[in-house]
Amino acid sequence: MTDHGADSLRPFFEANSVAIIGASRKMGKAGYNIIDNLLRFGYKGEIYPINPSAQTILGLAAYPNIAQTPKLAELVIIVLPPPLVLPAIEECAARRVKSVIIESAGFAELDRSGALVEKKIAETARRAGMRLMGPNSVGTINPSKNLVTSFPHLRLCLPDGRPIRPGSVAFIAQTGLFSFTFLPLMDAELEISKVACLGNKCDVDECDLLEYLADDPATKVIVMYLESIKDGRRFFRLSRRIVQDKPIIIFKSATTPLGAKVSASHTGSLAGEDRIYDTAFRQLGIIRAGSFDQLFDIAKALTYCPLPKGNRVAVLSNTGAGCVTAADACARSGLKIAELCGETLAKARTVYPDWWQVKNPVDVLTAVETSGFARGFTTLTRLVLRDDGVDAAVLVVGAVDFLAEEDVSIFFKDMAKEFPGKPLLVVNLLGDRRIYHRLSQRYKSFGITTYETVEGAIGALAALCRYQQYRQNA
Amino acid sequence: MTDHGADSLRPFFEANSVAIIGASRKMGKAGYNIIDNLLRFGYKGEIYPINPSAQTILGLAAYPNIAQTPKLAELVIIVLPPPLVLPAIEECAARRVKSVIIESAGFAELDRSGALVEKKIAETARRAGMRLMGPNSVGTINPSKNLVTSFPHLRLCLPDGRPIRPGSVAFIAQTGLFSFTFLPLMDAELEISKVACLGNKCDVDECDLLEYLADDPATKVIVMYLESIKDGRRFFRLSRRIVQDKPIIIFKSATTPLGAKVSASHTGSLAGEDRIYDTAFRQLGIIRAGSFDQLFDIAKALTYCPLPKGNRVAVLSNTGAGCVTAADACARSGLKIAELCGETLAKARTVYPDWWQVKNPVDVLTAVETSGFARGFTTLTRLVLRDDGVDAAVLVVGAVDFLAEEDVSIFFKDMAKEFPGKPLLVVNLLGDRRIYHRLSQRYKSFGITTYETVEGAIGALAALCRYQQYRQNA
């Protein structure tokens, strides 16, 4: 739908007024949850609940239909049973509504007759110059406007009930997980600029959103979960331009014939040949993730780390197994274990006992025992980051309470600022998930990203290297 | 060292008296930590701190040397600087000590002269009929005796300061991580029978421990992290026998030339050709893990799930992306998406709206919206588990607070007991790590194991299937 331009997508994230067709007084219903979410997250715009039989909903004046709202809503959300959706779209068209999200399910993802109705909906919208997200969308999020159109009840989603912090990572997904389940993780370990759940993509698709996000000043990193790509040609043309500026990371599922079959009944989409995508992604500098895990791992590295100048890695670990598994992971993902220069080695010896031989990966346990955690670990970290032969460093420590207690993260407080050109990734081996959570929050406040596993950190670093290499050669 | 027999290893886990050569009054020193760990974990045997200049350590009478303890210690731990270790071993030999753990480092893993001393140590021990674990070991754990010989200070390791619960999973590792960093995770998501950190394996090796654990009634599952295998022939002969009874899961690292090189300076061992291991493991029914993550994932499944009769999986997910990614993961790991029988499909329809089409993977969101979480999700779970065409079920839900709040795990309370022949694995997608921790504890109390990722659960289930298949064909 290139003729609309990216501006036509602004209301999905920046609307100053939102109408909810299918608004409900019953807690737990989508038409209630959306309004409650908007109120609780502190949305400042107008909210118009549309319900033919209610006077007020959640303290807001309700309207019998979209034609009777005080002003034309900039964004309309439809959460009606499937048979009522097309009539509602016709009503919106008559009222000249410009942006609609259909959060109802039961269309192309269900059966052929659903697909037919969906087609009529799309045609109606197109004729009226209306942009349509969905059907089967879970909604959009823009933290900087406190605009949340998700239908799951998010009241307890962020543990302390506060609004989502605005950040720089945009999520485009053919799933509602990013509008809901993943939110606490996205908020804890990243920071969100925009979220959009595409649903069946009967109008707005990943390309439209890419165009919009390319020009969105808040967005620095684009994360996508896709089961299919609607217009490959346009997608790759857009991506080629955008990745020069903003990295794009994609978890493309439905990669097996079985997965593709299941996807058809999830979002009614055809998955296409996986190898073709793989080649195209690589040629275009798009970073591919193989799971949601990897998607987050790589997004964290791209958000908090500078791009490394090369692939020479220093590993510092307070466990020998950390050194060995990191070396294995580096070898498998095309990273090199850096050779430390003579000066680094000589200075490193000062925090070890006489009999120790320093080498990379650096086993820091003996240094910590000899010189204490603060001096041992931080001296070695600074030394390797200062070494011209090192492009990035990975620290491996344990997420256990004796460390949390001693607050070792504080020793790395200024490390990211001190070495702005070199990625520093911390692995907090589990350990205890609660302690990991606490540690990761603290490191994040120092601009350092953390990982549960050595493989996760090294994999993310390797993705950074490949992206940087692509940009240099492009 | 086959001539000793497995009985010679009992003192490492069941000693009624422990002497610590190198005992220290200084908190943080290994010789202090070991004693404090023993006391705090409630060890009931005798503890003899050996220190030439101390009267008491941590309230215990100290002795100037091993010859002067009231009784012969059944287990001696040595935590001295490297040059003092050989003389201490000679002293132990003179006193006819039968079991020693050397937790000092600085031997074969360091350099050639260290390797020479290590060889002398091993010879001295052999001549004296002494069994030796290490050097460079972090110690052993036996929760049922409250025997903990780890030198890291574990006082804050288990968050509530209680002893480790005795269980059925044994960990043999060429790393100290299982004696320390991983303990909270091992305790939270599994239950420990024995832990041994092998160190440099100058005498006791993985084969000796396999023999011991084969006859250990508490141990049902054997988990190993190895960088090398000392005696492949013996290892494979033993494994072939043991896996008929008890599954063996191995994370063998140092699989790349780079990793192997690093391993040589970690535990002084030679890694060997990876492909040979891979083939041998497969032929012998040993389950191979590719990371610590996978090691735990598979161990959890083997501990809490029955072995499935076949590879036909039912997936129930409250997110479409869960269905698609599970189908992809099944296809990739040789599992089948089960075909549900007519009766199951007909009964399943009762919890959905009329227009819904039930199929496997089962998207339960609409059923939950229509019939509530309890009725929707549990009806469908029971139906698929009752279906003769289904061998195992994987549930995908989100680890978010609105679920924890409604305590949905309770609906699955009796499910594992109700279907004792079919594995049931729950994926609690992150979400929030703290909530995941809480949920996983609750599910575990119902005998159900949980995973953070779809790929983790499906991978573990596939390992169960392969193991069962091996046992059936053997």
Image (cartoon, coloured by chain):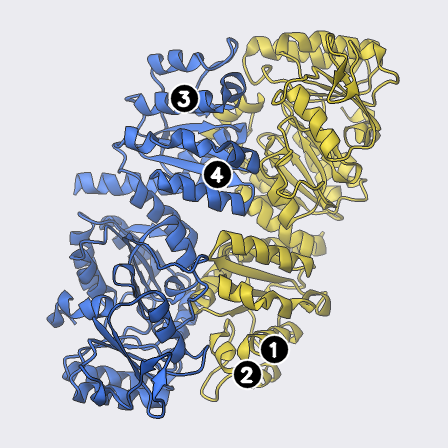
Chain colours: A blue, B yellow
Badge 4 element? strand
Q: Marks 4 and 1: same chain?
A: no
The amino acid on which the numbered mark 4 sits, given as a three-letter code, is: Asn
The image position of residue B242, as x and y in percent, is 74, 43
The amino acid on which the numbered mark 2 sits, given as a three-letter code, is: Val
Marker disc for residue A380: 3
**Residue at label 2?**
B351
The image position of residue A227, as x and y in percent, is 35, 65
Front position in the image: A23 or B313: A23
Q: Marks 4 and 3: same chain?
A: yes
The amino acid on which the numbered mark 3 sits, given as a three-letter code, is: Leu
Whether residues under marks 3 and 1 lie with C-beta atoms below 8 angstroms apart, the answer is no
**Residue at label 1?**
B379
In the image, is A98 to the left or to the right of B140?
A: left
Chain of the residue displaying label 3: A
Q: Quadrant of residue A461?
A: top left
**Residue at label 4?**
A428
The amino acid on which the numbered mark 1 sits, given as a three-letter code, is: Thr
Whether residues under marks 4 and 2 lie with C-beta atoms below 8 angstroms apart, the answer is no
Around disc 2, counting alpha carbons within 10 Å, would you say few (fewer than 14), some (14 to 19), or many (20 or more)?
many
